[in-house]
Image (tube, rainbow, N blue to C red):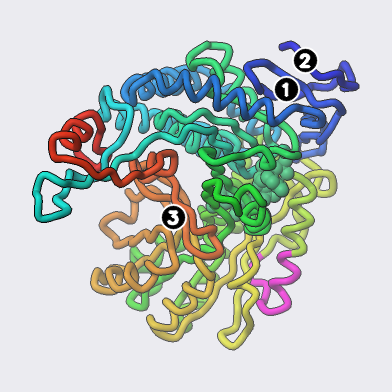
Amino acid sequence: MATTVENQVASNAKVLHSYLGGKWQTGAERGVPLVDPCDGTMLAWASSKGLDLKAALDYSRNVGGLELQKFSYAQRAELLGKIADLLATRREEWYEIARKNSGNTKADAAIDVDGSIGTIRYFAKIGTKLGDAHMLRDGAPIRLARDQNFQGLHIGVPLDGVAVHINAFNFPAWGLWEKAAVSLLAGVPVLAKPATSTAWLAQEMVAAVIEAGILPPGALSILCGPPNDLLDHLRLGDAVAFTGSAETGAGIRQHPRIQQGVRVNIEADSLNAALLGPDTALGSPSFDFFVREVVREMTTKTGQKCTAIRRVLVPAERAAAATDAIAAALSKVVVGNPANPAVTMGPLVNMAQRRSVEEGIRKLREQAQMAYQTESLAPVDASAEQGAFVPPTLLKLNRSAGDIVHELEVFGPVATVVPYRDKQDAFALARRGGGSLAASVFSSDTAFLSEAASALGTTHGRVLLVDPAIGDSHTGHGIVLPSLLHGGPGRAGGGEELGGLHGLWFYHQRVAVQGSAATLSALSAQAADPSAE
Ligand code: NAP
């Protein structure tokens, strides 16, 4: 890899280069360190200082965009298939980076890595049905006036700018590809900006794809290091897809370029709830499925999932039993260095996150009681002091207690049991998250489950209804599927991603076209209908 910017990076340190303007570039200073969260060992540096991001965006638009638009949807879907095949051959390398830089167990890494490959494959498959088209249509031509020859048609034209994808630290692989797959299929070039603290995996995956020469020039770029003035150079026709904290998301919304109309999708944080139905007796299948899911959500990726269960809503009369059952399951979690296969939960991503989670627990405790936490954490093959370890922590709210559990996202293996009086109270409590990504409801009463779907629908992006028939077969509360919408209202950002080919619309301008029946019929025939089976 060549460097084009003069830099003072130490020759013995691993440097994460950025791929911008069709070449590998390096920032001017050592920049931000990437560490192993088990012991703080320095793994790499990422710097974006001095990189010409205006030129990078221009190149993506002027070269990548034009090149990608020469391909039809089906041809671009074929490129996605090649990317998925390539990434799949190097799975073990990706797992290893995820273990070192994110503290992932193999199961955690698989959610990120295999989830990303599966998502690319999914879009490779469903993209082929769009065939030779270069634009979309939404429905059929409709008559607009007395003269039935005068008609209207909605079409979608791919954006002529660049898609800037800003991602969170917790899913460096999936976050990259769940956005890039849709954008590339749409024909819109990607400039990915992974979170700096875990950018290594994203950078290696992009490097593999670039080196394999699968994509045309300019179709895929990556910026490793802080965003600097990236957003200042956006213009009409570009799109920003952001995933991260509500705070950063709010700042991006305020950016002058966004205020001036550059399209944005925000996926932010969320206080997701799991709800145990009023009918579920202790020891019933629904009760057991509920407990298992809460524990899985608290500990998978050490609770660092935007969709993870933070609020555990249970009937007041069964709050003690549910708390005991969850605590008993949490006591079996083995915390430590994920290099040891006996470990079932690794560290948080770094010490800053550990401090943030510890502070979050302290704040929750101002209103909730500690229900379960290992007294003295002794992580396997690691030091409790030097590693970013936090034990699984369950709190319990008294019915009369305050608001913080509905307001504070503690991004770690932490959840709070919240007792409810009756189903209306349960729905009201779930809605107090202020807009969430996901809720799951466990019951064998199908009428109650249907009622929950509509009661929670206005404040949730996804609702998982678990009756015993799917207790063992559902994909999980926190798992985002490429065929379903991902996103949530309010605090969760108000965005929508994925949802099968529906996701393509974010990268297209929808246009209402008026004309004669013959003209619109010809236009319609050239466009593909993403909603058609
Ligand atoms: P973050 O601090 O908000 O950072 C997210 C991304 O934004 C990073 O790439 C960061 O770059 C970048 N960024 C920071 N300031 C920026 C600015 N002024 N302009 C443009 N980009 C900027 O979030 P995080 O700590 O990485 O991720 C954890 C949060 O993400 C949690 O709250 C979690 O709930 C949320 N999350 C949401 C979803 C979802 O789908 N809704 C999925 C995953 C995570 P640097 O790293 O270089 O600072």
Residue 3: image tag: 2
Label 3 close to label 1 by CB (< 8 Å): no
Q: How many circles with numbers are drawn on the protein?
A: 3
Image point (76%, 53%), residue name: 354
Q: Residues within 10 Å of mark 1 (few under 14, many from 20)?
A: many
In the image, is 497 to the left or to the right of 334? left
Image point (30%, 32%), residue name: 126
Q: Position of residue 178 (x, y in %)?
A: 48, 37
Which residue occupies the foreground of this view, 416 or 153?
153
Q: Residues within 10 Å of mark 2 (few under 14, many from 20)?
A: few
Q: Which residue is labeled 1 in the image? A: 17
Q: Is residue 370 magenta?
A: yes
Locate residue 197: give its quadrant.
top right
Which residue occupies the foreground of this view, 332 or 344?
344
Residue 305 at least partly seen: no
The amino acid sitting under disc 1 is: His
Which residue occupies the foreground of this view, 515 or 421?
515
